[in-house]
């Protein structure tokens, strides 16, 4: 980690800059039909708020020895209709995270290809991987 910091500092001294990546600019939702975690079925926003929430939940869980924020052992996330979905286990939250992050990355890739003048196919916004 220290080596990475030294490399970054050297690049900055040489005038290097980094572009701040922006997330998908298109309105994005994903509809989940879950056979394993059926209570998670619903349509969810895939946006910066959702990614920040999920990243925060998982990083907190990892950094604090398998404990969720505010001592809540069952995180809750609302879908687009406002219905609240509870995660009965870390495995359920991880599966949900993989689907949402995968959609986020797919839409960002779509946007980048579109910006480059290509004609990509919009990624599927349905999933059963939960």
Image: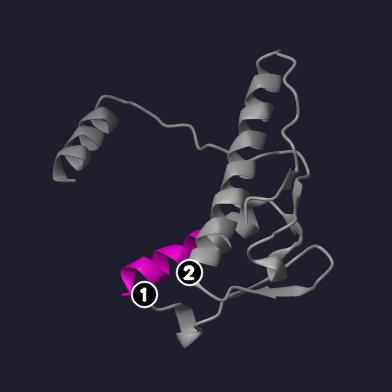
Name the magenta segment's main secondary structure.
Answer: helix
**Kind of element beneath mark 1:** loop
Dividing the picture into quarters, in which one does residue 77 lie? bottom right
Residue 63 locus on image (x, y percent)? 32, 68
User: Badge 1, how many Cα within 10 Å: few under 14, some, many 20+?
Assistant: few
For mark 2, does the 10 Å Cα neighbourhood hold few (<14), some (14 to 19), or many (20 or more) residues? some
Q: Nearer the viewer, residue 42 or 28?
A: 42
Residue annotated with mark 1: 66
Q: Which mark is residue 41?
A: none
Which residues are drawn in magenta? 55-66
- Residue 8's place in the image compared with 46, above or below, is above
Residue 26 is drawn in which quadrant?
Answer: top right
Q: Nearer the viewer, residue 95 or 49?
A: 95
Give coordinates of residue 43: x percent, y percent: 78, 58
- Quarter the C terminus occupies: bottom right
Residue 128 or residue 96, whichever sits in front: 128
Q: Are marks 1 and 2 in contact (CB under 8 Å)?
A: yes
- Residue at far front of view: 35
User: Is residue 37 found left or right of 61 in the rendered image?
Assistant: right
26, above or below 84, in the image: above
Q: In the image as oriented, which residue stretches furthest toward the right?
A: 81
Q: Earlier in the sequence, mark 1 or mark 2?
A: 1
Which mark is in front, 1 or 2? 2
């Amino acid at each position: 980690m220290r080596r990475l910091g030294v490399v970054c500092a050297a690049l900055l001294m040489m005038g290097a800059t980094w572009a701040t990546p922006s997330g998908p600019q298109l309105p994005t939702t994903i509809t989940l039909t879950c056979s394993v975690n059926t209570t998670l079925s619903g349509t969810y926003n895939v946006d910066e708020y959702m990614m920040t929430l999920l990243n925060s939940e998982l990083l907190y869980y990892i950094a604090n020895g398998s404990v969720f924020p505010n001592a809540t052992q069952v995180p809750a996330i609302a879908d687009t209709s406002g219905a609240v979905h509870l995660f009965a286990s870390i495995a359920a939250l991880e599966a949900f995270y993989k689907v949402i992050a995968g959609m986020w990355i797919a839409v960002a890739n779509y946007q980048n290809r579109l910006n480059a003048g290509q004609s990509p196919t919009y990624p599927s916004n349905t999933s059963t991987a939960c």
